[in-house]
Image: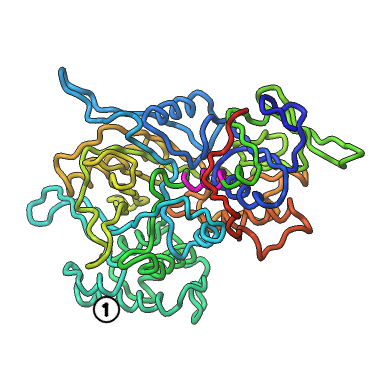
Amino acid sequence: MLDLNTLDGSSWDVVISGTGLAQAILALALSRSGKKILHIDKNDYYGGPEAAFSLQEAEEWVNKVEQVPNSMPFESASISRPTLLDGEKSQLSFARAYTLSLSPQLLFSQSKFLPSLVSSKVYRQLEFQAVGSWWVCRHGADSESDSQSTKLQRVPSSREDVFTDESMSMKSKRSLMKLLRHFLQQGQDGDVEPDQELDQEMLFQEFLQTKYRIPQELFDPLLSLSLSFKSIDKTHSTHALPNIKRHLGSIGVFGPGFGAVLAKWGGGAEFSQAACRACAVGGGIYALGRGIKSVDVISDDSEGEQLHIHLTDDESVKSKYVVGSAWDLPQQIQKERELPYSRLTRAIMVVNSPLDMLFPPTSENGPIPAGAVVTVPSAKGGPPTYLLIHSSDTGECPTSQCIIYGYVLLPADEGRTMLESAVDNLLKSTDANAKIIWSANFTQLGRLEDEKVADNELKGIHDQTFVFPAPELDLAFEDGLIDQVKEVWKAILGSEADESGFLKFDDREGMVDEEEPSENM
């Protein structure tokens, strides 16, 4: 029987390091396999790069990013609070009134991630809310007064939106309707252009101009639907078009007038914790505050080749397999990375206004959304800035406030300036009295959408070690993550793996997966 006060000398089938989304989904997939699973995390919280924090926890996290460089896929982190005048009180509520997510990504109804949440029954532990309107916020000179003005435009993404948009000319409407009709007729089979061969190098701007004669005024709205972090003249059609198809094909599946949702109470952290709870119910053992220092390969006549794993608390365990992310495993068992990581400048901002105008009903009989997407084009032709706005209905902040999650593909200093400018322009166009009352700025390291991960890249330097890549830098949950988890799951189970049963579970008899993972070690 395992001594719950120590792990030293224990043996396992699988040791999973880190509780990020990929590791948590793998733990879920293995939860009913009968394998002995030890799931550890060097941090004292769940979620890894998908974690969610209170205000105090967020500030502790920022300090850790700065004090322990290269320990996670984040860098250049800082906190900013407004200077208070004498006698002025902060408008921030108590620390636990906030849940700030490192992973507030969108989940589309056409996402590959969704069926796995349903078939594994994890969705029952989650609460989803609608992400409603897409907006473009432009800032520039007013032609009549020569003054600087900000204009907020709702992005049309359905026939109804196009017909009711009074800002577009009839010519623009006809061109846009032709493009939307083309996407909707293609269905969701994943092909970009089934009826005509598309040049793999064709840029999105060229596609719009040459194939559909889309006027320039619609470039920014269409780029926003593609969720590309690059400018339209650097975005490839092969990446933009499937994303727009996903957006259009998702509308109406969950409810009228919207196609994406967010997870209440903390985004990706909710997915990770729900998956870890399911593994704990299946017998998995959890231990926070313990990482892996080194791994040795040993030969044991009775059990064959095993891994000797040295933990950061100076204990050691044995296991047949070790799995983790690049930031949760020692470099000694990882293959050398060929390409540098891309860097995305991000911000989490608390605003002292609900910004209600960004959350109109999704349709005449639709729900009031809890999320909105705002794209702020660069005035100099650079990459766009994206702002995900979460209302207090998400449970992430008090009533009468909202959270803005900002993203821009620029270096840290330049990116932070761009994010501040974008939010300033948005607030001017929605609520002139609104102010940022707290913000965290940081850089995330990861992969862009054109950097795919081959199955053979998931292995470490040993056949029994597996390394999940850095997360894809995206505003929506990465579809490829499920495929990565499946490959590792198949390798661990070997001949026992039945692909048709991957993440497909029947209800447990007389049991509901709502227990917290054990942390008593």
Q: Is residue 375 something one can see in this rendering?
A: no
| Range covered by the magenta-colored residues | 270-277
Image position of 209 with respect to 236: above or below:
below
Q: Quadrant of residue 235?
A: bottom left
Identify the residue at horizontal 21%, vertical 55% (top origin).
152
- Would you say residue 272 sits in the magenta stretch? yes
In the image, 464 versus 238, the foreground residue is 464
In the image, 141 versus 475, the foreground residue is 475
**With 458 as the anchor, is 73 left or right in this view?**
left
The N terminus - image quarter: top right
In the image, 459 versus 42, the foreground residue is 42
Q: Whole-percent x and y of residue 381?
A: 33, 53
Give SS at disc 1. Answer: helix
Image position of 44 with respect to 432: above or below:
above
Q: Quadrant of residue 83?
A: top left
What residue is disc 1 on?
A: 174
**With 307 as the anchor, is 208 left or right in this view?**
left
- Would you say residue 30 sits in the magenta stretch? no
The C terminus - image quarter: top right
| Secondary structure that dominates the magenta span | helix
**With 231 as the anchor, is 398 left or right in this view?**
left
Query: Residue placed farthest to the front in the image?
Result: 510
Q: Whole-percent x and y of residue 419?
A: 32, 42
Q: Is residue 357 something one can see in this rendering?
A: yes
